[in-house]
Amino acid sequence: MKPAIMAAVLAVPGPAWSQGQVARDTMPRDTTPPAAAFGVTEYRLARQKLEQDMQRGGFSVYIIADMEGLAGAVRNQTEMRPVSRGGSPQHERFRQELTDEVNALITGARAAGATQFIVNEGHGGTLFRNVLVDRLDPEAILIRGYPKPIVMSTGMNPMVDAMMIVGAHANAGSPGIISHNFAFDSFTVNGKVLNEAGIAAFIGGEMGVPLGLASGDDVLTAETREMLGPIETVTVKTAFSRSAAAVLPPATVHRTLRQAAARAVRRVKTGELKPLKLQKPYRVRFCLRRSFTEDEWVRKTVGRLEGVADGASPGCFVYTSNSAEEVGNLLNEVEWTVLKP
Amino acid sequence: MGLLVLARERLMRCFVGTILCLTSALQAQTAPPSSAPFREKQIPREAGFRVFIVPDMEGMGSAVDIREVIAGNEGERYKELTSPDYWDRFRLLLTREVNATIRGARSAGARSFVVNEGHGGNLFANVLPWELDSSAILVRGFPKPLVMVTGIDSSFGTLMFTGAHANAGSPGVLAHNFAFDSFTVNGNILNEVGINALIAGELGVSVSLVSGDDVLIAETQKIVPSGFVAIVTKRAVGRSAAITYSPAKVRRMLQAGAAEAVRRERRGDFKPFTMARPYRVEFKLRQTYPDSIVQAVAGLQEFKLERKGDRHFSYVTDSARQMGWLLDAIEEAVLR
């Protein structure tokens, strides 16, 4: 884990150790509380700012752009991260693939009458900067960078008509390509298991916005249908291990994505696809990833977040709230604790 | 402006050899800035309405992260603060933003263009000379006497800032202000745009266009009361995160904005940004700088700074231009 918030050095007088005078391996841990890091907790501000850019009327699609579930992608170390973050130059090709798949969704949705497109970067390997900004459909708004409030649902608001997630991956513990779920080994609301797509559907669902489409490997598409019902899913590869798959040709995937996005928009318009609503209060139970659980500082810091109480076993916690948006922000504060840039 | 990043390199070296740095810091007078002999040089005169453009990078369209605006060759430490695939893309986007601004200004009748690199990445050499509009003169490299407005004179009809960023401490993308935690003139808080607008204002040149994130625009509208054409390139939702728009859309906004800016400037809508003399300047060097840099600034004999606190200095002058020279002297002290 990289302990330094180097990005902040340019901007603010950070803690003394972040200024570079201490060797990396002796750097003390960054203990900036989430509340003190601009962009972690300002979820209402982000929502207001996005709403200012949204058109009244029309049909708005909010696309979450992840990478593990892209056509062709199988290997975390080389394909999911750039050289500057311990990866390889091959990552650059997958940035193009990501941009192509997002553009395919936009093209398909537009054909079915969608008029506005918001793309939220959902992959952290490059600190949420993966889409090639100058090759993305020029009408789209792109939310990029880290930290940003509620990572994968930044700015979500009731003016959005439909959500889609592309390049998604299966849940932590599922036998899918690079499967995981934020910083968790498990995450449930009212006993319902949610993967990352499910959590996005939960946050948007409270605002009346359905998740209309999810694409990724066969494990992701099957588990997401089980979670959310018969939404549009596009299976881009069949997993043979966490890092091997039978992959479909990217051109085929792009065509399928266009068709599925058009169907998703139509099915949302007719009211066939409904937002995910869970009963309030939301009883959230989550267990941190084992590697984080073994870290006493992480365990204690998460335990001290507002409203969080210890759960059944070490590293597991409970949290009760009447707001899915607040649950989303809690998740974001946990991310900040375990995963500083 | 981004140069303070470079201070970290110096800083690291200091901590590696602490004793050496302290020794040199205690030696009395800091050498005058190496750009001093070039202070009176002028950019060749050109006919027609002249536009002086200062492109910075933190506030440009799409940029959110330091790795997108640092070249990585500024020193050993910066290798980690860059990602060539990112910076390379962004310097091309930067050049295209400048070209869009020039196109817009030209369409409204401007005929002469000077572009002065306002961003310290790659030591003030980010714009691609071969891709830049072929009618523009480009000021690039470091050090330079007036840093962000080097070469400006009273022959310019207007001044434009693109890609500007919010002040130190503001909740904007990559917000900072030269080497300072705060900088005021006659009690007024100034960001980088404000400081440079004052230097230009003294020459009778007014600001007609500013582009940057929503935070920069809002704060600059308070600093420069006579107004300017404002282009919001993105909305900050974190210090390194923003709601962004297509680079093509940002270029369209810049082109239309620059045309409007020139039209309104020629109509007399904008006033040079001025303040009562003498200028009472107060600044606080960044808390994060080591003492050696503070000592070096304290040793700048030419400017007769008064030290009011550990990092707190005041300076009185009748010339904003001289204040600009001080800025370069501080930048050089930080880097030397």
Image (cartoon, rainbow, N blue to C red):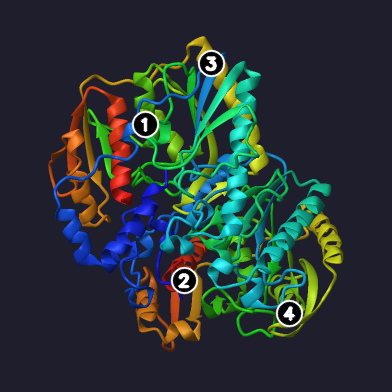
What is the quadrant of residue A30 in the picture? bottom left
Q: Which of the numbered marks, if any, corresponds to residue B316?
A: none
Alpha carbon separation for disc pair 2 and 4: 26 Å
**Which chain does the residue under circle 3 lie in?**
B
- Answer with mark 3 or mark 1, whichever residue precedes in sequence: 1
Q: Which of the numbered marks, if any, corresponds to residue A219?
A: 4
User: At x 40% / y 84%, what residue is drawn?
Assistant: A295
The secondary element bearing badge 2 is classed as loop
Q: Which residue is mark 1?
A: B38
Q: Quadrant of the N terminus of chain B?
A: top left
Could you classify mark 1 by the number of other residues whose Cα lies within 10 Å: few (under 14), some (14-19), or many (20 or more)?
Answer: few
Q: Is residue A55 above or below residue A185?
A: above
Q: Which residue is mark 3?
A: B264
| For discs 2 and 4, the disc positioned in front in the rendered view | 2
Amino acid on which disc 4 is placed: Val
User: At x 87% / y 65%, what residue is drawn?
Assistant: A252
The answer to whether marks 1 and 2 mark residues whose Cβ atoms lie closer than 8 Å is no
Q: Which residue is outermost to the top?
A: B267
Asked if both marks, 3 and 1, belong to the same chain, the answer given is yes
Depth check: give the residue in front, B287 or B269.
Answer: B287
Could you classify mark 3 by the number of other residues whose Cα lies within 10 Å: few (under 14), some (14-19), or many (20 or more)?
Answer: some
Could you classify mark 2 by the number of other residues whose Cα lies within 10 Å: few (under 14), some (14-19), or many (20 or more)?
Answer: some
| For discs 3 and 4, the disc positioned in front in the rendered view | 3
